[in-house]
């Protein structure tokens, strides 16, 4: 529901979740009664006031985004997209995703979820998991984005990723330029990673990864929250 770009009806929600429409309707009505969802004039559901409160309090409690802003700012001179994200199952959810000359705050919450296997952030965080955990994650997937060879080729790439301090993900070929994402897991936040993406030549990967590693090492939400008391 929250990842959708438009309000959803109960039947559409049931299809996406692969559950009975009656069950989806009960769940949605319960969430609406709690204030987490609300209905529009077409009786479709969207985020309610309770979710905004929950989001604000979660952001305050974690301290991740404010602690990361100086590190993100330090990478904007690359001219590449700078992103901070967390892994949720087989998807990356972005806290911030943007590039200069846009304002830094314009990138907050700008992008929805994205397949982890196509993302530098996702690959860096998947590499922190065991092979068995990754197999279980993709056990019911018909395909793995970016890996036509399936789970075997994904696990091989994750093995390579674990041998170095950064992950890479090829995203697309655009106007004869290779679009890559380079991700580095945060040492102080196991569930989050920092990334640069854009037209990056392979011989630039190591230098940009070095900058990412240095920036990621400065992101410490616990220290930020202690200093903010």
Image (cartoon, rainbow, N blue to C red):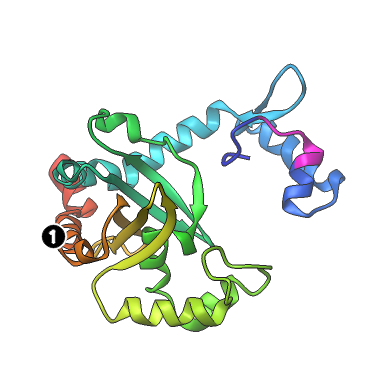
Residue 229 in sight in this render: no
> What x and y, as percent, mark residue 117?
48, 64
For label 1, the SS is: helix
Q: Residues within 10 Å of mark 1 (few under 14, many from 20)?
A: few
Q: Is residue 149 left or right of residue 39?
A: left
Please name the residue shown 34% across and 57% down the image: 181
> What x and y, as percent, mark residue 30?
72, 38
Q: Is residue 18 left or right of residue 223?
A: right
> What x and y, as percent, mark residue 97?
35, 41
| Foreground pick, 134 / 34 | 134
Q: Residue furthest top?
A: 41
Please name the residue shown 55% across and 63% down the image: 145
**How many marks do you count on the picture?**
1
Q: Which residues are magenta?
A: 7-12
Q: Quadrant of residue 21?
A: top right
Residue 19 in sight in this render: yes
> What x and y, as percent, mark residue 76?
19, 41
Q: Quadrant of residue 173?
A: bottom left
Quadrant (top left/top right/bottom left/bottom right) for the C terminus: top left
Quadrant (top left/top right/bottom left/bottom right) for the N terminus: top right
Residue at mark 1: 214
| Vertical arrangement, residue 215 with respect to residue 2, above or below | below
| Foreground pick, 169 / 15 | 169
Please name the residue shown 29% across and 43% down the image: 65
Q: Quadrant of residue 120?
A: bottom left
| Foreground pick, 15 / 26 | 15
| Vertical arrangement, residue 113 with respect to residue 122, above or below | above
Indicate yes or no whether the magenta region holds residue 100.
no
Please name the residue shown 69% across and 68% down the image: 142
Q: Is residue 147 left or right of residue 14?
A: left
């Amino acid at each position: 529901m929250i990842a959708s770009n438009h309000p959803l009806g109960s039947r559409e929600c049931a299809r996406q979740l692969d559950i009975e429409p009656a069950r989806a309707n009960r769940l949605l009505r319960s969430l609406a009664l709690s204030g987490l969802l609300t209905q529009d004039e077409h009786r479709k559901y969207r985020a309610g006031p309770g979710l905004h409160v929950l989001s604000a309090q979660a952001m305050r409690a974690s301290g991740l985004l404010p602690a990361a802003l100086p590190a993100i700012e330090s990478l904007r001179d690359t001219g590449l997209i700078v992103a901070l994200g967390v892994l949720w199952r087989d998807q990356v959810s972005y806290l911030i995703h943007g590039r200069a000359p846009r304002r830094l705050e314009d990138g907050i919450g700008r992008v929805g979820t994205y397949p982890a296997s196509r993302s530098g952030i996702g690959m860096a965080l998947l590499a922190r998991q065991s092979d068995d955990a990754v197999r279980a994650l993709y056990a019911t997937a018909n395909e793995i984005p970016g890996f036509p060879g399936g789970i075997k080729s994904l696990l091989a790439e994750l093995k390579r990723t674990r041998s170095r301090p950064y992950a890479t993900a090829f995203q697309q070929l655009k106007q004869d330029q290779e679009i890559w994402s380079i991700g580095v897991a945060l040492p102080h936040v196991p569930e989050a990673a920092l990334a640069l993406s854009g037209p990056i030549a392979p011989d630039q990967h190591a230098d940009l990864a070095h900058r990412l590693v240095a920036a990621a090492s400065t992101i410490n939400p616990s220290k930020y929250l202690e200093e903010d008391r």
